[in-house]
Image (spheres, helix red, strand yellow):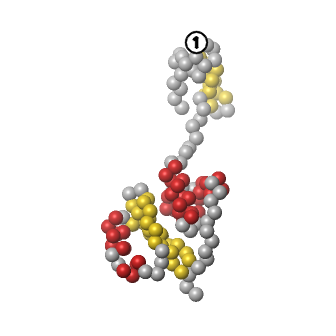
């Protein structure tokens, strides 16, 4: 952690003054104030939170979202609980997904067989595209 200024007097004249709970303590030479630098937590970008929740609503499982986005399935579960997301229930359809680049995506849509009989959503995923397709379960 980089210390810039004393939080009490904004002086840059400080020295190290021991360790408490595995965190470095400092003492300001000007005002004799002792302080500790707060540890910064790890935060996932809001883009990935939104994308994970979108994929959850589209019917993907937590583990599938983990494999696609590289974010822990536990984090996705916590976001679902935090934002109280409810997935619509429909057991007759199941989603399949593909990760495609722009050329593969245009080739997919140029085939008429791919466009009939199922709903399709295309969403951006970094420099590629994710295609989610709903198909009926076979009876």
When the figure is inspected, residue 90 is found, relative to residue 9, above or below; the finding is below
Q: Which residue is mark 1?
A: 30
The answer to whether 48 appears left or right of 85 in the picture is: left
At x 36%, y 73%, the residue is 109
When the figure is inspected, residue 97 is found, relative to residue 39, above or below; the finding is below
Quarter occupied by the N terminus:
top right
The answer to whether 121 appears left or right of 80 in the picture is: left
Percent position (x, y) of residue 103? 32, 67
When the figure is inspected, residue 80 is found, relative to residue 2, above or below; the finding is below
Residue 74: name its quadrant. Answer: bottom right
At x 43%, y 80%, the residue is 116
The residue lying furthest to the bottom in this view is 139
The answer to whether 49 appears left or right of 82 in the picture is: left
At x 57%, y 63%, the residue is 56
Percent position (x, y) of residue 102? 34, 64
Percent position (x, y) of residue 126? 41, 56
Percent position (x, y) of residue 117? 46, 81
Residue 14: name its quadrant. Answer: top right
Q: Secondary structure at mark 1?
A: loop
Residue count near mark 1 (Cα–Cα under 10 Å), binned few <14, some 14–19, many ≥20 = few
At x 38%, y 57%, the residue is 127
**121 vs 95, nearest the viewer:** 121
Can residue 78 be seen in this snapshot?
no
């Amino acid at each position: 952690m980089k210390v810039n200024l004393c939080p009490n007097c904004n002086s840059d004249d400080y020295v190290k003054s021991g360790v408490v709970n595995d965190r470095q303590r400092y003492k300001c030479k000007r005002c004799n104030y002792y302080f500790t630098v707060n540890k910064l937590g790890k935060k996932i970008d809001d883009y990935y939170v939104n994308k994970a929740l979108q994929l959850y609503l589209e019917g993907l499982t937590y583990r599938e979202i983990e494999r696609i986005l590289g974010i822990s399935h536990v984090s996705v579960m916590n976001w679902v609980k935090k934002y109280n997301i409810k997935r619509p229930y429909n057991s007759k359809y199941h989603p399949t997904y593909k990760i495609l680049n722009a050329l593969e995506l245009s080739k997919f849509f140029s085939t008429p067989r791919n466009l009939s009989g199922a709903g399709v959503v295309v969403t951006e995923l970094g420099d590629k595209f994710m295609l989610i397709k709903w198909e009926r379960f076979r009876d």
